[in-house]
Image (cartoon, rainbow, N blue to C red):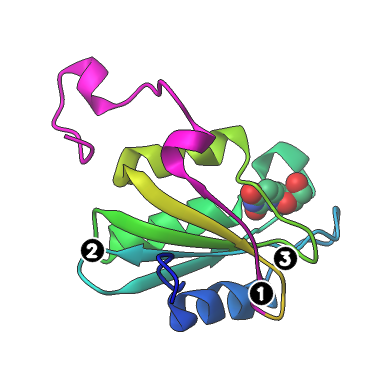
Amino acid sequence: MTDVAPVPEDLIAAATSVRERAYAPYSNFRVGAAMFCDDGRIFAGCNVENAAYPEGLCAEGGAISAMIAAGGRRIVEAVVCGGGAPCPPCGGCRQKLREFGVPAMKVHMVDPSGGVLLTRTLAELLPDSFGPDNLGVADVQA
Ligand SMILES: O=c1ccn([C@H]2C[C@H](O)[C@@H](CO)O2)c(=O)[nH]1
C-alpha cells in the first residue's frame, strides 16, 4: 500500500511520445509536456525552436495552448519529459502553469521510458505567486 496516487499512465505516455516530435535542432534538448485537464482530457505539446532563438516555444506552453484552444481551463496534473534527468519547468512556464493549475497540482518530471524522476507541486515550484486574483480576476486557485 502507498498513499501516493499513481501518475496516470496515459498522461506519462502523452508526454514521452510528443517529446519525440519536438523540433529542437539548436539545443538538441527535446521536451514533451502533457496536461491533465479537469474534464478528463489530456493535452500535449513539445518544444518548437527557431533560428531566431528567442522565438522558440516551450513544451508546456504548447500543451497549455492546445488545452485552451480545445475549451479546457483547469489543469489538475502535469508531466514533463526532457530526457534522462528531471526537467523542471522554466520560470516562464511555471507562471503559465500557475494561470490554470491549483496550488496542489502535481508536476511530474519523467524520463523517456516513463519513470518518474521527481514530483513537485505547483506551490513548491512557484511559491507566493502572482495570479489573476492580484488583478481582481476570478482565479482557478480560489
Ligand atoms: O521546461 C522546459 C525547459 C526547456 N524547454 C525547452 C526550451 C528550449 O527549446 C530547450 C532548451 O532550453 O528546452 C522546454 O520546452 N521546457
Specify the amino acid type for callout 2.
Asp
Along the line of sight, the residue nearer the viewer: 87 or 26: 87
Q: For the residues marked 1 and 2, what is the alpha-carbon distance in whole angstroms? A: 23 Å
Q: Is mark 3 within 8 Å of ligand 1?
A: no
> In the image, 118: left or right of 33?
right
**CB atoms at circles 2 and 3 under 8 Å apart?**
no
Q: For the residues marked 3 and 1, what is the alpha-carbon distance in whole angstroms? A: 23 Å
Residue range of the region highlighted in magenta in the rendering: 114-142
- Badge 3 local density, few (<14 within 10 Å), some, or many (20+)? some
Residue placed under numbered mark 2 in the picture: 38
Mark 1 or mark 2: whose residue is earlier in sequence: 2
Residue 50 in sight? no
Specify the amino acid type for callout 3.
Tyr
Residue placed under numbered mark 3 in the picture: 23
> Is residue 111 one of those drawn in magenta?
no
Q: Is mark 1 within 8 Å of ligand 1?
A: no
Which-is-in-front pick, marks 2 and 3?
A: 2
At a point 53% along the width and 54% down the height, the residue shown is: 60
Specify the amino acid type for callout 1.
Gly
In the structure shown, which secondary structural element does the residue marked by tag 2 occupy?
loop
- Quick check: 122 above or below 108? above
- Badge 1 local density, few (<14 within 10 Å), some, or many (20+)? some
Residue placed under numbered mark 1 in the picture: 115
Along the line of sight, the residue nearer the viewer: 41 or 71: 41
At a point 33% along the width and 62% down the height, the residue shown is: 67
> In the image, 141: left or right of 60?
left
In the structure shown, which secondary structural element does the residue marked by tag 1 occupy?
loop
